[in-house]
Image: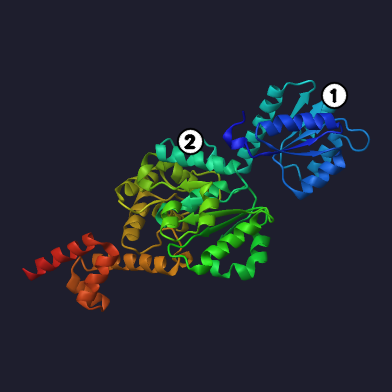
Amino acid sequence: MSEPNQRTATVMIVDDEIGVRDSLSDILSDDGFAVVTAENAEAAHEQIGIAPVDMVLLDIWMPPGIDGVALLKRWKESKLLNFPVVMISAHATLDAAVEAMRCGAADILEKPFSSKRLLEVVHKQIAKSQQQLYDPALYAANLGKSPAITKIKGALMRAAAEATLPVAFIGSGECAPEFFARMLQRQHMPWVEVDNLAKVGENLEKLFGQAAGGHIYLRYPDEPDQNTERTLNLLLANSAKHKTRLICEFPHRLDEMHAAGKLGAELHRKFSELQIEVPRLQDYLEDLEAIINLATRRLTGKQETDGHFSADAIEELIKEAAQWQTDGLSRLLGIMRSALTKEDEDAPVDADAIRNLATAATAGLISLGEDVYLLPWRKARETFEKQYYVALMRRAKNNYQLAAKMSGLERTYLYRKIRTALGEDGVSAGKDEDNKDAS
């Protein structure tokens, strides 16, 4: 029985004997693999150019015409060898085996071999190739050990294997769903974000031209209009043809959105196959150092994380995040991004810099890590208003009368707006200061 994360992998069998092709195909199909076959080197080369495969079982001797080693050489020289190839032979000479390995073969299966041996080799090679295709963090043992990170990592690994299915990431912008979604990006493949769903229809071919073979990432609005579902269905209908994966961020669970009439039955069905709930930052505080190291690599584009943040700065980031009640990874990434833009080439970011940036973020003076211009209008307005009122009340020291004067807004109106944006806590703080002044 194959493991879950290998069940949809595609294996190509290249052998001139139909009996061998059929036998191997039956074994692999019964174990859950998709199988394609080719009777000679030319047919195999043609199929590779049409559709991607996860690995190839290639016969060394295929008279007449090009043999397996020559085909392997051809793929390597054409830079098409982005999948593991296991050579099959009954009478391979040592020279042929050495030449095959030199040309990029991952392993050699000598006939006769058992079904068990075949499946062991196939599973091993596909697992290894998947680890090379995706972000190494997806398979890294040190990404985290908290239940929240363990759960999302398992869901991501399943999604990485089910590469033909669309993915739904469930979580608010504060949780930074795209940070985790990026682990599903195949290396060197395009990642295209859709900022405006309304314009997708008129730019469909251009969009898929940019994303072909890669990924399209979009955010489903909290309040979708009548064109939203039509656009998303259009993308889904064309994604397979362009070998492009659709990854969508949803603000709420799909069942809840469907029940509320914000997500149609067809989209609900298609995206429900692969749902990944993004955890709150507060649920994986113990893993923040590993997350910070991964974020540093992402933000700097360098694999080496040393020299960007001092040990004290990392401790300060973790300490600050532990105090947040609602803000999440998005805010942490915003602080890190701001720190790195001011990084001194001769010295890493220190704890004082992090402390100052964290204070500024609380006051709404820097971006919380998510570009407000990419948000739907209602969410962008809410984000701005919340930041504005937090900064205003800090400057006015929670005095509504002074805040009204500074903002140029009528006091009762300001009180109502702050109550809406910040909740009862923001209102109560202002009341206390006003009462002090009155006394």
Viewport quadrant of the N terminus: top right
User: Which amino acid type is shown beneath numbered disc 1?
Assistant: Ala
User: Which amino acid type is shown beneath numbered disc 2?
Assistant: Asn
What x and y, as percent, mark residue 239?
A: 64, 56
What x and y, as percent, mark residue 426?
A: 23, 62
Q: Nearer the viewer, residue 116 or 90?
A: 116
The local secondary structure at tag 2 comes to loop
| Residue at mark 2 | 142
Q: Quadrant of residue 77?
A: top right
Q: Nearer the viewer, residue 133 or 65?
A: 65
Q: Residue at x 40, y 52 (%)?
A: 332
Q: Label 2 near label 1: C-beta < 8 Å?
A: no
Left or right of 16 in this view: 436: left
CA gap between label 1 and label 2 equals 42 Å
What x and y, as percent, mark residue 242?
A: 68, 56
Most extreme residue toward the right is 64
Left or right of 265 in this view: 238: right
Q: Residue at x 76, y 45 (%)?
A: 80
What x and y, as percent, mark residue 288?
A: 40, 43
Looking at the image, residue 91 lies above or below residue 269 = above
Left or right of 11 in this view: 177: left
| Residue at mark 1 | 92
- Name the disc covering residue 212, or none: none
The local secondary structure at tag 1 comes to loop
